[in-house]
Image: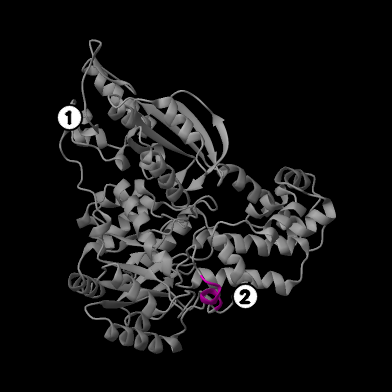
Amino acid sequence: MDKKEIVNVLERISVLLELKGSNPFRTRAYQNAARALEASSISIGGDISAKELEKIKGIGSRIAEQIQALARDDDLDLLRELAEDIPPGVIDLLKIPTLGPKKIKYLYQTLKIENISELELACEENRLSGLPNFGPKTQENILKGIQSVKKYSGSFLYADIYKQAVEVLENIKSHKLVQKADLAGSIRRKKEIIRDIDMVAATDKPQQVMDFFLSLEQVSDVIARGASKSSIKLNTGIDVDIRAVSPLQYPYALHHFTGSKEHNTAMRSMAKKKRIKINEYGLFKNGTLIGCKDEKDFFNVFKMEYIPPELRENYGEIEAAKEGRLPKLVKKQDIKGIFHIHTDFSDGSMTMLQACSYLKGLGMQYAGITEHSKTAAYARGLKEAGIEEYFKEIEKVEKTLEDFTIFKGIESDILPEGELDYSDDILDEFDFVIIAIHSHFNMQEKKMTDRIITAIKNRHSTMLGHPTGRILLARDPYKVDIARVIDKASEYGVDLEINANPHRLDLDWRMVKYAKNKEVKIFINPDAHHLENLNDYMYGVDIARKGWLEAKDVANTMDRHKMRKYLKEKRSR
């Protein structure tokens, strides 16, 4: 197991212990160990020693041994024993946003509720409203939470499954009878939410490749077995479909199974006018196959530029490819620095030095440190009295890092009427200000839109962070006319953020393209709270590519000298 997976196991153990009513100190020990391990910079491998782990404050000798076992992919007796005592459906109740272990335990013991369906029925029959610490409002919120879980059932975050997809793909590629293989479907198009993993493999011996695929160690269940198409379920719960085709058919099959359905339909319609038939087996004119050695050849048949997979959504890419005006999409290596970084000055777990040293090691030229503002008391937001110390730490760290610039920033809360939560004198001291909504999400659309626009008009505002407030698979965007917000951002010279946290990926890629058309600059930021989150900027690049962005459209492709000048000009507007 990797570090993230081990953290998840420790958290699961703490939850199971709480559901069983175990000693609260024991439960807390696993919670603390999970947080400590996640926040640490330690690298986890099969040869990790217990002594190394025990150096992390919050991890004792017993839990260190268990982490060792998990790193070696050994089973934990404790986890198995705990899971045997609690029905699986009870664990599923934790997916409901408004329910924690204590309430779940109470419902399990009092009403014998063992799964989401039983809980939904209990709410509909009004059996929760009279219970201690519940009430009608809590019951209503639980029902809303259940609907949310149902809505997103069977969906996965791109970041959570990409690594698994690549592991399976590399296994397929390693087979001696496989000539080529690639991911297809929504994961190749870099969609934020994935329902399953699609793959295409080129081979002259499909049955042997199918047999190999079905025998992979990651397989928990075989869904379908065929001579050239098979489906499995991974241990993590996601389905994987593979198509084995001949090397001759490979370019056509890869295009077809990459999709999207809308892109394929539009391509077939265009081809029909040229009397060409498109399917997964080839391009045919008058029944004769038009030979293509790869996807570039495929598009060349129609005198089109090669369309990158991310753009294949029937969102204007076909017309642009025919006219030779597809964008030269931004790449990960174009990013020169990162903003929206929280350190231990607010609610981050890393020091400023750790964050900036890590970024410098990645080849970055600068960092925009961005602590929470005073209204965010829950996140230890910076009060006015602490700002001077914050600036001194930035200056101190910057002096220790050669050829690396640190910009002084703040994530200022947009208050209900659109005002920011510091005075103009305080805001003048920062190099940049990210404005963002962190409260009062349930406003009507016009009021929320006006609120954000009022903040955009503030001369201190540099960029709008996580513009729609969505949490993927958990919370819908708040009601906002985002097109109108982008129009005003363009008018007032305020940039927008693609928040690259895999749970957000906000701004949506469709509106990213709209912002590009309105000449609004985009920052790709990880909203990092832990060291490993700094790498999340890469997921933001994927969304930028889906939104047609080129390097010139992304502010943080500037080098550190140009960025200093850029921020200075924004402050003087």
* Residue 158 in sight in this render: no
Q: What residue is drawn where x is 66% and y is 55%?
A: 94
Q: What residue is drawn where x is 37% and y is 86%?
A: 393
Q: Dot 2: what SS? A: helix
Indicate left or right for 42 with 9 as reference.
left
The residue where tag 2 is placed is 61
Q: Magenta residues, as a range?
A: 49-54
206 to 190, vertically: above or below: above
Indicate left or right for 127 with 296 as reference.
right
Indicate left or right for 425 with 329 as reference.
right
- Give residue 210's mark: none
Q: Amino acid at mark 2?
A: Ser
Instruction: Find out whether residue 532 is within the magenta segment.
Output: no
Query: x, y (%) of residue 325?
Result: 17, 40
Looking at the image, which is closer to me, 273 or 185? 185
**Disc nearer the start of the sequence (1/2):** 2
The residue where tag 1 is placed is 300
Closer to us: mark 1 or mark 2?
A: 2
Q: Amino acid at mark 1?
A: Asn
